[in-house]
Amino acid sequence: MSKSSDCSASRNFTNQETNNKQPLPPIEIDELLTQVKHSHGLYYKMVNLEIWALVETLEQFFPGAWNQFMANRQVSMKQFLQHSQNKKVEM
């Protein structure tokens, strides 16, 4: 196929596409927001389910690992908050 026939074919496709376009039906913003919120809610539920499955699997192979992780996390969070407060005082 030559370059000129490629160009005319793509022009025809674009013209057909443009001629066949129908205006989109009006969608209420509230409906869209509700759909997005619902979608985000489902996403977070799926993430929580996956984390729960990982924790359960971890506990089967290494009993007490989750408790140790949470204890380490608590210590780390306290250190982080203390460091942040000290940094604010220095400024």
Image (cartoon, rainbow, N blue to C red):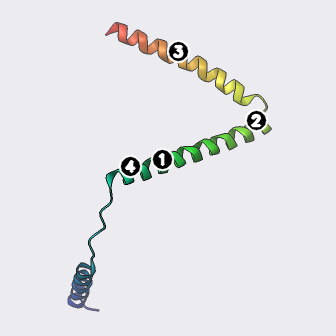
Amino acid on which the number 4 mark rests in the picture: Leu
The residue to which callout 1 is attached is 40
Instruction: Give the Cα separation between the discs numbered 1 and 4.
Output: 10 Å
Q: Position of residue 34 (x, y in %)?
A: 42, 49
Pick whichever of labels 2 and 1 is earlier in the sequence. Answer: 1
Q: Nearer the viewer, mark 3 or mark 4?
A: 4
Q: Pointers 4 and 2 in contact (CB under 8 A)? A: no
Q: Nearer the viewer, mark 2 or mark 1?
A: 1
Q: Position of residue 9 (x, y in %)?
A: 25, 88
Q: Of 67 and 33, which appears nearest the observer?
A: 33
Q: Nearer the viewer, mark 1 or mark 3?
A: 1
Specify whether 29 is left or right of 72. Answer: left
Specify whether 67 is left or right of 88. Answer: right
Instruction: Give the Cα separation between the discs numbered 3 and 2.
Output: 26 Å
Specify the quadrant of the image occupied by residue 48. Answer: top right
Q: Nearer the viewer, mark 1 or mark 4?
A: 4
The residue to which callout 3 is attached is 79
Q: Secondary structure at mark 1?
A: helix
Amino acid on which the number 1 mark rests in the picture: His
Residue 59: assigned label = 2
Specify the quadrant of the image occupied by residue 25. Answer: bottom left
